[in-house]
Image (cartoon, rainbow, N blue to C red):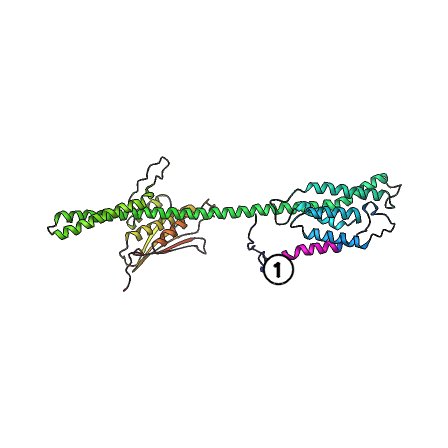
Amino acid sequence: MEHSAARVPGLPSWLQPTSRLRRLAHWLYPFALGCGVTLFSLATPQRPAIFVFEGQPFSPPWALVGLAMLACGVSAALIRRARWPLFVVSLVAWLGLSMVVAVFIAAYYAGAGRPGRPQHPGRAWPYFLVACVLVGVPVGWSSVHSDLLYEGMTGGLVFGGVLTSLFWVGMTIGLPFVFGLWVRARRQVLEQLRDRAERLEREQHERAERARSDERRRIAREMHDVVAHRVALMVLHAGALEVSTADPRTAEEAALIRTTGREAMQELREVLGMLRAPDLADGTVPELAPQPTLADLDRLLDASRAAGLPVRRVDQGQLQEVSLSAQRTAYRVVQEALTNVAKHAGPVPTTVTLHHEPHGLTVAVENAPPPRPAPPVPESGLGLVGLAERVALAGGSVQARPRLDGGFTLYARIPADPPEIRAVPA
């Protein structure tokens, strides 16, 4: 799976994955690897592997040497596309000219896999086993049949040849292969951590969207009840006026109002009827109680005190007339804030401040720092998301921030009238 490069905390800007230097290095890396393999291939005995320790001169054609060096470099440069060319060329160059650099690089990529594909690194053991045989056997043969070993050595020539073969296999194949396996494991761990972080972020986003949707649904239910009640009163008064008036024109207008009101109620039920869908496990519709307002705030504070939360209320400013919608929003702000205090801080002193302004209401809930850090609560923070959505629909704003002493403050400003009925200046 491809991932977009993200900023890594703690790295300077010129080392970030999105920096120009990193992109340039990523582009030049295959060419640098190919050129390095080509140049270092010169530092080889340039003789067949079975004569690697022989002192006799061996002069292969320089065209063949140059072709082998170029083939090793090109196959190394194409390692991001395919690994098998490097595997084949490295073994052929080793058997023909003892070019060990290509074998070293191929052993590393046999363990590490293809760059950029940590989830599909490829099979590593076939090359490892074949390379161990094709490197170990010629080296052991050459060491036994050369002046490198002597008859009187401990264990004899065969034992010395086996040790020499194992040393070469370990240094040219085993060491880079093990390092490549470590790089492969590290890539896979980082890939899993990246996938997990993206999944958690996606789930958190989905939970936040679900909280917003639930809050909008609850607000729509409340508005459905309020609007239906007001329209029902309008229809009732219009019907009473129709039967009590003696003026025919007034009766006709009252009948029109009554008919229009009934049609509006029917359309309202059709549009918002889905909000009355069954919510309980047994399929029943929950009974909706009247929505609380600021008149019920003291009852909420008393319930919090009974639960062990020391909370006090402070009213500031001159009392102003506030719409029922704004009062319900203010009540929900205080309710959510007290819930968060009890959940995250425990029974700490809390102050609920209501500041009455000429054109709005400001609600502030402040709590003292907890005596000890509270353990993290799963799926926390969604209540504030829904609360911010509710206050925004009411035309207000919410701010929640920690204090320097370790406490927390929730601040909400709510207009006195809903945005849709607020007076517009001429």
- The quarter of the picture where residue 50 lies is top right
Q: Nearer the viewer, residue 318 or 106?
A: 106
Residue visible at 26% across and 48% down in the picture = 264
Residue 166 appears in view: no
Residue visible at 24% across and 47% down in the picture = 263
Residue lying farthest to the bottom in this orientation: 426
Residue visible at 71% across and 43% down in the picture = 127
Q: Nearer the viewer, residue 39 or 164?
A: 39
User: Which residue is label 1 attached to?
Assistant: 21
Residue lying farthest to the left in this orientation: 246
Please state the horizontal and vertical placement of residue 286, each as a whole percent of the image: 32, 39
The question of residue 24 being in magenta is answered with: yes
Q: Is residue 234 left or right of residue 158?
A: left
Please state the horizontal and vertical placement of residue 416, each as a whole percent of the image: 30, 56
Where is the C terminus found, in terms of image quarters?
bottom left
Element at badge 1?
Answer: helix
Residue 158 appears in view: yes
Q: Nearer the viewer, residue 337 or 246?
A: 246
Q: What segment is highlighted magenta in the picture? A: 20-38
The question of residue 268 being in magenta is answered with: no
Q: Is residue 122 left or right of residue 264?
A: right
Type of secondary structure dominating the magenta stretch: helix
Q: Is residue 280 above or below residue 264?
A: above
Circle count: 1
Please state the horizontal and vertical placement of residue 312, each as a whole percent of the image: 34, 51
Residue lying farthest to the top in this orientation: 282
Crowding near pointer 1: few (<14 within 10 Å), some, many (20+)?
some
Q: Is residue 131 left or right of residue 323?
A: right
Amino acid beneath label 1? Leu
Q: Is residue 99 left or right of residue 9?
A: right
